[in-house]
Amino acid sequence: SAPHMHAMALDLLEPNLHKGSKVLDVGCGSGILIACMARLVFDKTNNDPSDDNESSSTDKDSDLYDSCNSGNNFDSMGAVYGIDYIPELVDFSTKNLAKDPFTKNLIKSGYIQLQAGDGWKGLPSVLGGSDSINNNKRQKSSSSSSSSGELTDEYAESGFDCIHVGAAAATLPIALVNQIKNGGSMIIPVGPDGNQKLYFIKKDSQGSVSQKTICGVRYVPLVKTKEAEDV
């Protein structure tokens, strides 16, 4: 995506980008948006306005790494996830993020996680705790909901605080909408080439979904896996 589109997305998602936020970037590409999101979620100066800014950036990054390594408490610290259909782009993102000590430390401690995957399905495996049986059930349920087009409240409490999608879906992926937690939001381009719109999807505290058209856009398509196309 163009830098001004990333800036627009961050501006719209900013209310849900703070300490403790669980964030998903679909189509992580170069990793630049993940780096920006990580700064908003984990940077102490962003989360603590009273910080006097006297300590160096290196010291703050070191402090953050120490706090992350004190135990992977994703509920209190937050987490930033990235997925991409192309494994080579996941590797590209990881290498780019490793160039900055701040994001490199977050990858090491597990607070930034990237993997190859189907953006249409989202990432339900990280939304139900560490219980693999429950995760498998959630994945099957999410797949079923996606194919049937049913909105559910399965992730009302455990879902993502915000989701950014960097490729245009032909239709709105219901699985992604379901993975937004109550009070969360999503930015996603939707529509065929030549007639795409950027949508801001919002869930209120009760789980009611609303959408707002932001502007016309032109993105590469959000690719479906062969398995998804056959459903």
Image: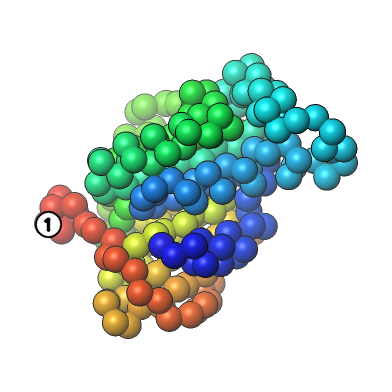
Residue at 73% x, 45% y is: 46
Residue 231's place in the image compared with 124, above or below, is: below
> Residue 64 at x, y = what percent?
66, 27
Q: Work out which quarter of the rendered image holds the C terminus and state it.
A: bottom left
Residue farthest top in this picture: 70
Element on which disc 1 rests: helix
Residue 196's place in the image compared with 42, above or below, is: below
Q: Work out which quarter of the rendered image holds the N terminus and state it.
A: bottom left
Quadrant for residue 113, please give it.
top left
Residue 188's place in the image compared with 42, above or below, is: below
Residue at 53% x, 34% y is: 100
Residue 196's place in the image compared with 37, above or below, is: below
Residue annotated with mark 1: 230
In the rendered structure, the answer to whether residue 210 lies left or right of residue 58 reads left
Disc 1 marks a residue whose amino acid type is: Asp
Q: How many neighbours does mark 1 have within 10 angstroms: few (below 14), some (14-19), or many (20 or more)?
A: few
In the rendered structure, the answer to whether residue 218 lies left or right of residue 16 reads left
> Residue 159 at x, y = what percent?
51, 47
> Residue 27 at x, y = what percent?
36, 52
In the rendered structure, the answer to whether residue 199 lies left or right of residue 83 reads right
Residue at 31% x, 56% y is: 120
Can residue 116 be seen in the rendering of this structure?
A: yes
Can residue 117 be seen in the rendering of this structure?
A: no
> Residue 128 at x, y = what percent?
46, 36
In the rendered structure, the answer to whether residue 113 lies left or right of residue 10 reads left
